[in-house]
Amino acid sequence: MYAAGLSTRPLRSAHRGGGRVHGLGRWVLVTGALVGASLALARVAAGATAPVGVVVVQPGDSLWSIAAARYPSDDTRERVDAMERLNGLSGPTIVVGESLLLPPGS
């Protein structure tokens, strides 16, 4: 007969790293950050305006009403066009709860 022996060593977790990012994960994070920074710099270099604020669309809001309220001394048509471009909109349709980037004021 053979006696089955049981190990008295404590079990160790196969997971090592303690929540740290290693290898490929670190590479992906660093690469993503560099690409994001490069795109932002390219936009600024190309003359694109950086947004200065965000507004959340409320019931009854329109691009026109937001532009008129935020930029009372500017041409509202130009502000609506700038908001459409900055937010990638193809028209004036917005949805309640949507966050819109606001262009800098003049």
Image (tube, rainbow, N blue to C red):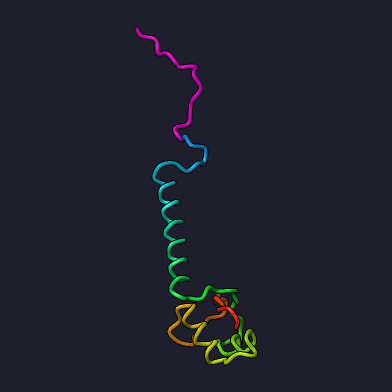
Residue at (44%, 56%) from the top-left corner?
34
Instruction: Count the numbered circles shown.
Output: 0
Q: Residue at x 52, y 82 (%)?
A: 83
Q: In x, y percent, where is residue 9?
A: 49, 19
Is residue 29 within the magenta segment? no
Residue at 53% across, 87% down: 80
Q: What main secondary structure does the magenta stretch of the protein show? A: loop
Quarter of the picture holding the N terminus = top left
Viewer-side residue, 85 vs 50: 50
Q: Which quarter of the picture shows residue 96?
A: bottom right
Q: Which residues are magenta?
A: 1-15
- In the drawing, does residue 56 fall left or right of residue 92? right
Quadrant of res 67: bottom right
| Furthest residue in direction left, as rendered | 1
Q: Nearer the viewer, residue 102 or 7?
A: 102
Q: Residue at x 59, y 74 (%)?
A: 52
Residue 43 drawn at (x, y percent): 45, 71
Image vertical order of residue 33 relative to residue 26, above or below: below
Q: Eyeballing the image, is 2 above or below 24? A: above
95 above or below 12?
below
**Residue 6 lies within the magenta run:** yes
Question: For residue 38, which quarter of the picture?
Answer: bottom left
Q: Position of residue 90 (x, y in %)?
A: 43, 84
Residue 89's x, y, as percent?
45, 81
3 left or right of 17? left
Say which quadrant the C terminus sits in: bottom right
User: For the view shown, which residue lies furthest in the top direction?
Assistant: 1
